[in-house]
Image: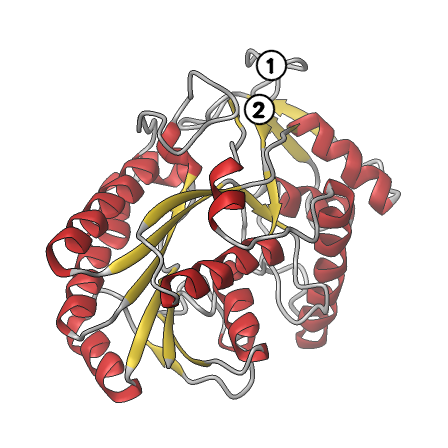
């Protein structure tokens, strides 16, 4: 049995590929390398450079590698960018996903695991938010993912394509063995940015909005370690192979931290009191979003191993230092960052 991982050279996808490879699973990666890196793919795993919306290419991969399951990560993921360039997000996230799903159906793929997002909930009325809460995205990014969820459910009903939709909350951290991590140039994830500031790769960290209706005025998020998120995918695949039903599951820990909380943890872990400034709110940012995790814990044999913000930050710091060494060896340690 072979699994196709789209976006498998990216942040979360590369962790997924290592997890499957470590388990002795057959795996092949499809990635256009627009934000991913060929070196991030586990050694020995085939990498096909291309677009998940290229139906001829996807059909060939499914046929040549006898693909049984697809884990679909490939997407554009920066919320403010989706507000500025909505059509690009609908093309890359929704149109390409429709093409991929059609190929999966025609190619006889049995299982699909889809990388979705808590952005579908927008500003939820109840915290923690459950999977049956109304979908009310406040960004094109959220809508692009919700549209794909809808297509996948409809395809499942019409064609028997079993699937599990995993709605990610805020993914952070890195592989504990430092084999891969968040390496994207100019990343916007808070922990990544804070770690870069601590290591002198950014002149400062900006807090986007300090007037939200939260205890300290900054946004609150549920941070999940990337390795625990990947473990949820492994358990989802196991569940589908065992004949489990299609379903939608939140992927978080069930408790949140504010932007200020995260900054303080990074400062403690790094020992650096880096510069922090305030900036206006960003379009598309929800005030507070925390997962209700009852369904995933009930449905999957998922037992998180890294449910500790300090551990997440330590692993992120370790990876950033490793990345600095790699980039320093090439003489471009700072070239990937814009002045802040």
Q: Quadrant of residue 326?
A: bottom right
What's the residue at 78%, 51% (across, down)?
314
State the residue in front, 222 or 335. 222
Element assignment for label 1: loop
State the residue in front, 198 or 131. 131
Residue 214: numbered disc? 1
What's the residue at 68%, 15% (across, down)?
216
Disc 2 crowd rating (10 Å Cα; few below 14, some 14-19, many 20+) is: many
**Can residue 98 be seen here?**
yes
What's the residue at 16%, 71% (across, down)?
55
What's the residue at 55%, 11% (across, down)?
213
Q: Which residue is mark 2?
A: 219
Q: Quadrant of residue 253?
A: top right
Is residue 58 toward the left or the right of residue 289 in the image? left
Image quadrant holding the C terminus, namely top right
Q: Position of residue 100 (x, y in %)?
A: 22, 64
Position of residue 110 relative to residue 122, above or below, is below
Query: Which is more N-terminal, label 2 or label 1?
Result: 1
Q: CA distance from mark 1 to mark 2?
A: 7 Å
Q: How many marks?
A: 2
Is residue 32 toward the left or the right of residue 296 in the image? left
Question: Circles 1 and 2: CB distance less than 8 Å?
Answer: yes
Element assignment for label 2: loop
Image quadrant holding the N terminus, namely bottom left
Position of residue 282 relative to residue 246, above or below, is above
Q: Position of residue 251 (x, y in %)?
A: 50, 44
Q: Position of residue 106 (x, y in %)?
A: 13, 71
Is residue 144 toward the left or the right of residue 312 in the image? left
**Can residue 200 be seen here?**
no
């Amino acid at each position: 049995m072979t699994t196709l991982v789209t976006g498998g050279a990216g942040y979360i996808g590369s962790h997924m590929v290592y997890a499957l490879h470590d388990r002795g699973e057959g795996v092949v990666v499809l990635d256009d390398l627009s934000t991913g890196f060929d070196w991030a793919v586990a050694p020995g795993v085939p990498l096909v450079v291309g677009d998940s919306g290229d139906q001829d290419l996807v059909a060939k991969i499914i046929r040549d590698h006898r693909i049984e399951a697809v884990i679909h990560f490939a997407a554009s993921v920066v919320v403010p960018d989706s507000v500025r360039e909505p059509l690009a997000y609908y093309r890359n996230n929704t149109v390409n996903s429709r093409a991929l799903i059609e190929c999966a159906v025609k190619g006889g793929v049995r299982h699909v695991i889809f990388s979705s997002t808590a952005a579908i909930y927008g500003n939820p009325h109840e915290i923690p938010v459950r999977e049956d809460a109304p979908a009310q995205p406040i960004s094109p990014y959220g809508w692009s993912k919700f549209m794909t969820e809808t297509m996948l459910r409809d395809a499942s009903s019409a064609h028997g394509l079993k699937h599990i939709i995993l709605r990610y909350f805020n993914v952070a951290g890195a592989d504990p063995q430092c084999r891969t991590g968040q390496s994207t140039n100019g990343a916007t994830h808070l922990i990544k940015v804070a770690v870069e500031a601590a290591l002198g790769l950014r002149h400062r960290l900006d807090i986007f909005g300090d007037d939200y209706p939260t205890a300290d005025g900054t946004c609150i998020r549920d941070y999940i370690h990337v390795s625990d998120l990947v473990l949820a995918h492994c358990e989802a695949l196991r569940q589908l192979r065992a004949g489990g039903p299609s379903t939608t599951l939140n992927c978080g820990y069930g408790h949140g931290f504010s932007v200020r909380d995260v900054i303080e943890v990074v400062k403690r872990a790094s020992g650096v009191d880096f510069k922090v400034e305030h900036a206006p709110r960003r379009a598309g940012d929800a005030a507070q979003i925390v997962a209700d995790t009852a369904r995933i814990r009930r449905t999957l044999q998922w037992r998180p191993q890294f449910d500790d913000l300090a551990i997440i930050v330590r692993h992120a710091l370790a990876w950033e230092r490793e990345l600095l060494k790699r980039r320093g060896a090439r003489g471009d340690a700072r070239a990937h960052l814009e002045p802040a």
